Amino acid sequence: MSNSHGGTGHFWVQRLTAIALVPLTIWFCFSLASLPQMSHANLSAWMSSPFNAALMILVIGVGLYHGKLGLQVIAEDYIADRSKRVITIGSITMICVLFGVIGIVSVLKLSFGA
């Protein structure tokens, strides 16, 4: 497949992540709104549910991947210099991976009560 056709797959993955984020965001908002207080103890108890922890990890992973795809499109469209574009996209990817690891480790720590 040539580079001229690579954008189609990227386009559809970005749409699929957007669609996946709709129910995940609704779940997240209603779940947090249902907590009696936004205290560390309540959040830890809520996160100790495997269901909530798994969905929270999905929110983090899908959200960051969706954001990475969007930022990559912006970089590809607006950075003309190839080397600057590659460095920018690489930086975006590394930052998203870093935030993903921090977020998932945080969820697991809360989930397991550490």
Image (spheres, rainbow, N blue to C red):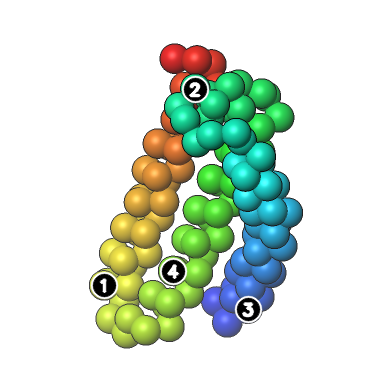
Q: Quadrant of residue 76?
A: bottom left
Q: Residue at x 49, y 22 (%)?
A: 41
- Residue 17 visible at all: yes
Tag shown at residue 71: 4
Q: Residue at x 53, y 34 (%)?
A: 37
Disc 2 target residue: 41
Q: Residues within 10 Å of mark 1 (few under 14, many from 20)?
A: few
Residue 77 on image: x %, y %: 43, 83
Decide which of tag 1 and tag 4 comes sooner along the chain.
4
Q: Quadrant of residue 71?
A: bottom left
Decide which of tag 1 and tag 3 comes sooner along the chain.
3
| Type of amino acid under label 2 | Ala
Residue 113 on image: x %, y %: 50, 15
* Front of the two marks 2 and 1: 2
| Secondary element at tag 2 | helix
* Front of the two marks 4 and 2: 2
| Secondary element at tag 4 | helix
| Type of amino acid under label 4 | Leu
- Residue 105 visible at all: no
Tag shown at residue 84: 1
Q: CA distance from mark 3 to mark 2?
A: 50 Å
Q: Quadrant of residue 90?
A: bottom left
Tag shown at residue 5: 3
Q: Residue at x 55, y 46 (%)?
A: 61
| Type of amino acid under label 1 | Lys
- Residue extending farthest to the front is 36
Q: Residues within 10 Å of mark 2 (few under 14, many from 20)?
A: few
